[in-house]
Amino acid sequence: MPLALFSTATTSPRLGKVIGDRIIDLAEAAPGLPATVIEFLVAGESARQAYDAVNPDSPGARPLSDVHLHAPVPAPEKYLAIGMNYSDHGAEAEKLGLTVPEYQLWFNKQVSCITGPFDAVVLPKVSEKLDYEAELAVVIGKTCRNVPREKARDVIGGYMVANDVSARDWQLRTGTMTLGKSFDTHGPIGPWLTLDHEVVDPQALTVRMLVNGVEKQKANTASMIFDIYDQIAYLSQVMTLKPGDILATGTPSGVGVAKDPPAFLQVGDVMRTEVEGLGYIENRVVADT
């Protein structure tokens, strides 16, 4: 069952276990457990065993509809995203004059962009080309370096839904992409962390984006050019990956900038990002203030 970070009108953010339409407050049901997702991942098997023992009859249960869900990992050390990792998205990028890379193309989303699964996304005053990107996010579960591809799944903590919100005008000004990917609120993630052992095959999940109820993107993670295990093996040759680090694994075709004519997000638009088996996040675009 997924691990969520939530609060109520009378409580600060804390961890909960989602069981159906209810959430169990782990501060009540298992007070010995860590207080954050990253600490939970670091604790390893002992935390997992205590977590697994929490059940629908444990104390601290309340309706999921009564709580506010936060970004499960609000302050990771790293938030990395891979570009043009679906062949169909690469083809539409080429039409915009971009070159599909021979090697994995990674960029940073600054961690300050992270926001909650149902929080607002701000249309910056300085951007006229706000866009969406539905993605599967992988959360690293163990400190690791030089991970062989065949061992890559051993270091995954779990999975989330992510929307790699992009200010295209800022993104395309330079080759690094970081500024166009890192505006405040442009990193909604969640709605919770689904632990790795609960996902049979992360390379067989449907990813969808709907804007105002209209489907804009739909693909299966099997269509990635570089799969999750290749990504972890590649990145870990360069840097030590830490528990809580987020890897956004790429978006399929259908982004707004590639439409003819381009169709960018406007104030009031609602983005619903879904990944099969992991739930959905939903974010309304609001004006900058």
Image (cartoon, helix red, strand yellow):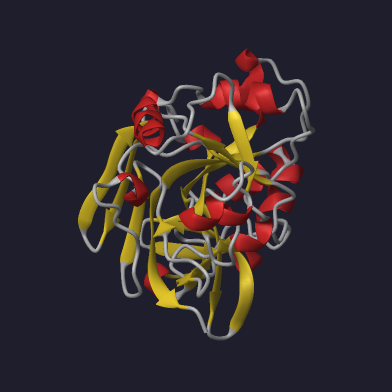
In the rendering, at what x and y percent does residue 55 appear? 49, 54
Q: Is residue 268 above or below residue 10?
A: above
Give 73 or 4, whichever is nearer the viewer.
Answer: 73
Q: Residue at x 64, y 77 (%)?
A: 12
Give 80 or 194, whichever is nearer the viewer.
Answer: 80
Q: Residue furthest left?
A: 214
Give 197 or 288, whichever is nearer the viewer.
Answer: 288
- Residue 118 at least partly seen: yes
Tell me the quarter of the picture where residue 86 sits: top left
Q: Residue at x 71, y 47 (%)?
A: 78
In the rendering, at what x and y percent does residue 70 appear? 54, 66
- Residue 189 at least partly seen: no
Q: Residue at x 67, y 30 (%)?
A: 155
Q: Residue at x 78, y 32 (%)?
A: 239
How many numbered marks, from 0 up? Answer: 0
In the rendering, at what x and y percent does residue 69 appear? 50, 67
Q: Is residue 58 above or below residue 203?
A: below
Q: Is residue 127 left or right of residue 76?
A: left
In the rendering, at what x and y percent does residue 187 appear? 54, 58
Q: Is residue 34 left or right of residue 83?
A: right
Q: Is residue 279 above or below residue 15?
A: above
